[in-house]
Image: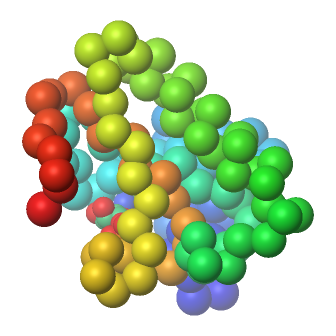
Amino acid sequence: MSCLFCRIAAGEIPASKVFEDADVLAFNDINPQAPTHVLVVPRRHIASLNDLTDEDDQIVGEVVRRAAAIAKTKGISESGFRTVFNTNREAGQTVFHIHLHLIGGRAMHWPPG
Ligand code: AMP
Ligand code: ZN
């Protein structure tokens, strides 16, 4: 198994977990870009948003709703937070297992760089 986030999901590589259940895992980004920077991932390997099928609708919904729930526990629901899926080269995707960045705890700019 070569995928980094599959290995984290399998417990082969340590991570600073903030949530896990049978389908979804969330852990702190190793290189945080804000006071809160959590990655929310499905346990099942999906390389990018380009690979989603209708069978993935439920897991994508779980990932997004989990990000919102974690934002609430972090106390940033009201102040605001950003959620980002990077896809492929020009968006800067470096890990090819879908992950939702949950970023918050500071003011952010738009448009993003
Ligand atoms: P992306 O560039 O959208 O593919 O995001 C990949 C993210 O994974 C980056 O923000 C990295 O800092 C983060 N990352 C890489 N390796 C690890 C790791 N071992 N544990 C936690 N986060 C990681
Ligand atoms: Zn994977």
- Image quadrant containing the C terminus: bottom left
Residue 33 image point, x, y percent: 18, 48
Residue at horizontal 46 percent and vertical 16 percent from the top: 73
Question: Is 4 on the left-hand or right-hand side of 33?
Answer: right
Q: Which of 79 and 37 is in front in this view?
A: 79
Tell me the quarter of the picture where residue 36 sits. top left
| Residue farthest right in this picture | 55
Residue at horizontal 29 percent and vertical 56 percent from the top: 30
Q: Which of 16 and 102 is in front in this view?
A: 102
Q: Nearer the viewer, residue 6 or 91?
A: 91
- Image quadrant containing the N terminus: bottom right
Q: Is residue 14 above or below residue 70?
A: below
| Residue farthest front in this picture | 111
Residue 66 image point, x, y percent: 61, 34
Residue at horizontal 27 percent and vertical 32 percent from the top: 104
Q: Is residue 24 visible?
A: no
Residue 40 image point, x, y percent: 53, 48
Q: Is residue 97 visible?
A: yes
Question: Is 113 on the left-hand or right-hand side of 96?
Answer: left
Residue 68 image point, x, y percent: 52, 28
